[in-house]
Image (cartoon, grey):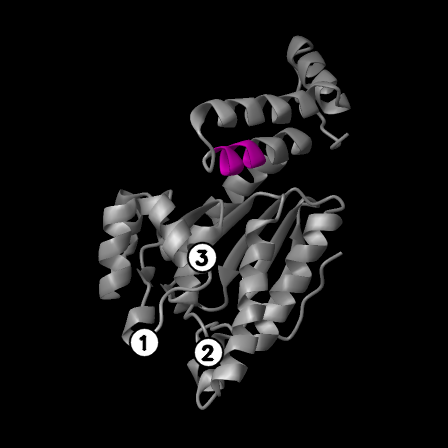
Amino acid sequence: MPQSTDTLNVAIIDDHILSVTLDRPEASNAFNTQMAWDLISLFEELAVAPDNLRVVVITGAGDRAFCAGGDLKERNGMTDREWFAQHLVYERMVRAVVGCPLPLIGAINGAAYGGGCELAAALDFIYVSETARFAQTETRLGIIPGAGGTQNLARAVGEKRAMELILSGAVFSAEDAVAWGLANAICKPDELMDATLRAARAIANNAPIAVRQAKQAIHKGLQMGLLDGMAFEIEAYNRTVSTADRREGVLAFNEKRKAIFKGE
């Protein structure tokens, strides 16, 4: 079972929900190398041994920032070789996040800049605080987004909008994030986590195998042509037919009771 570390606060909620808090508030929850390794360990473990977990909620410590991106103080003075070596860790980190079979919901509680914006865009969906702000600031530093930002942000907001945001490095608001399709809902700061957990509980109450297959069908299908995507959908659908949860769901419907899903 995932454990808290020096950079991550990890907790189990209602048996099936994993809460993950980026926990470097003194650095606006920026990624350092250790946090990247901790996220790799966490998400690679979830990929092979989710145990009883069904949903992951990700947020940042404090009320100022979700994640300020890469820790530039740690990066200050790095040689090219050291920079490349660290970035390989960041690349593995984002692949571990994107490859997680469990639904990932973000509670974006403040600034999400650079890699923080990339992480938010890599999640399955996000709710945002009224105080949240977003930006892909990399071109201001002489680099470009390198943790999926050019891909995930463009898929969320469209090519033209992503071009504008990434090439300019402009900051955009929580309201913009919702209007442009990056975020699903905007919440008052003190209501953000409650709203996020309501969504997490609604998902956790559904059949976990079906939820994971639906996630894969959506995510991978959007990377295919329509007919290939529909064929992949049927493969995912067929994996649910022989499950005990499918039989329990139909039985509970006919018995007019709440289904009890076991992930079997």
Residue sitting at the far top: 254
- Where is 5 relative to 222, above or below? below
Percent x, y of residue 255: 69, 10
Q: Which residues are magenta?
A: 215-221
**First in sequence: mark 2 vs mark 3:** 2
Along the viewing direction, whichever of 80 and 53 lies nearer the viewer? 80
Residue 220 falls inside the magenta stretch: yes
Give the residue drawn at x 72%, y 26%. 260
Quadrant that contains the N terminus: bottom right
Pointer 2 residue: 71
**First in sequence: mark 2 vs mark 1:** 2
Percent x, y of residue 119: 46, 58
* Badge 2 vs badge 3, beta-carbon distance below 8 Å: no
Pointer 3 residue: 148
Most common secondary structure along the magenta stretch:
helix
Pointer 1 residue: 142
How many angstroms separate mark 1 from mark 3 (CA)?
17 Å
Q: Amino acid at mark 2?
A: Asp
**First in sequence: mark 1 vs mark 3:** 1
